[in-house]
Image (cartoon, rainbow, N blue to C red):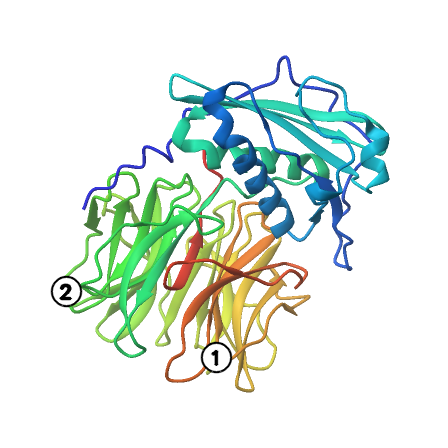
Amino acid sequence: MRLVFACCVLALTALTAPLAMAQSGPLRIEITEGVIEPLPVAVPDFIPLNAQATQYGARIAQVVVADLVNSGLFREVPQSAYISQVTDFNTPLQYADWRAINAQAVITGAVGLSGGRLTVQFRLHDAVSGQVMAGLQFRSTQEGWRRMAHKVADAVYAQLTGEGGYFDSRVVFVSETGPKGDRRKRLAIMDYDGENVQYLTGSDDIVLAPRFSPNGDRVLYTSYETGFPRVYLLDVTTASRRPLEQADGTMSFAPRFAPDGRTVVFSLTRAGNTDLYRMNVSGSGLERLTSSPSIETAPSFSPDGRQIVFESDRSGSQQLYVMNADGSDVRRISFGQGRYGTPVWSPRGDLIAFTKQNRGRFHIGVMRTDGSEERLLTASFLDEGPTWSPNGRVIMFTRETQGANGRAALYSVDITGRNLRPVRTPDGASDAAWSPLQK
């Protein structure tokens, strides 16, 4: 199966002249763990610079609005409330008209199409101070218009929050079809918002736990096509794949890339014992990291590659542990009631997300890397498998409904526990892994 991601791999440039403006101003969202009042933002349709670009002006504006609103930090001022209309990208705004409808930020833009390539320009205005805060220009193939809209939203988000964006990213996941107990599973990839779904494998074999490489070009996953779990490496662009080297009589699963992208850590079962191992992506250099009669699995590297968090039942129940990347200095970090699993280190390095089961309920939670300040963000019949957005602000996870017809779906929540949202997918979905920002 060969997939060509011509619409996703874009020649995308950000030009700071002549659009780059003073990158300062009083308008800024301060993100705390308290309740945040969303910032009112107005996004008029982008102005088409020629007839060929007419179809893209409203569509790009709609994606920008959806990105910002879905973050939970912004709310849209509807176009029906506008007093002024933006008909020329270079005409100064009447800021008083935007303040009158309580639009604190205004995003204006223009789009042109020539020779199959789109040019998108935008400016971010502080309506309160009457200043242009930022402006950029992007170029791409015509098919990449959604990516350019995500790029605009990322730039606005970064300017107004002081944090990196996460909209121009993708998610690899397991697509599930069929009744419970006889579900067909295959790997799929999509934009972070559920658009542009493409399938990477067929549905003949059970697949689990896909994980992106640090630059998003490869995916590790577990397949049961031989009847036993085995780790495979897949190229996202070509969908070509190969198994990692594995001796007969062993089972490998729960793989994860190191931050350098050159090594892999995973669980390997030999002679009935499951430990963590590390090896080169080429399949050479297999090294055992743990040696315990318990089950060690679900490893995840710290962003600097120096430590690994994992789950183990060596204490008698499923708990979280951190060790050095060479397997030394193992220490337990979870001590609350219940069982802990599927830990994932934040891209920022400050938090670890996890699944917790306690008193018949499942939770997605976060804690400091030493196990302190545990906070549960969700509660449900079955919540599991957290994955971090590229900026470490949002967590996506699997939620399954109860009963014989229960269905797995993807949800997202921010690290304060606010803004719980479903993620649209064509069918059931589980085991999500978030990519880094696209290049």
Q: Which picture quadrant has residue 43?
A: top right
Q: Looking at the picture, does residue 205 appear above or below residue 126? A: below
Residue type at mark 1 is Ser
Q: Is residue 160 left or right of residue 204?
A: right
Q: Is residue 322 left or right of residue 106?
A: left
Tell me the distance, in whole angstroms, between the alpha carbons under discs 2 and 1. Answer: 33 Å
Q: Say if residue 405 shows up in the picture.
A: yes
Residue 324 locus on image (x, y percent): 48, 55
- Residue positioned 83% across, 27% down in the render: 130
Q: Which residue is mark 2?
A: 226
- Residue positioned 49% across, 60% down in the render: 323
Count of number-bearing discs: 2
Residue type at mark 2 is Thr
Task: Name the element at disc 2.
Answer: loop
Front position in the image: 28 or 42: 42
Q: Which residue is mark 1?
A: 315
Q: Which picture quadrant has residue 426?
A: bottom left
Image quadrant in which the C terminus is located? top left
- Residue positioned 23% across, 47% down in the render: 283
For label 1, count other residues whose C-alpha is less than 10 Å away and answer few (under 14), some (14-19) or many (20+): few
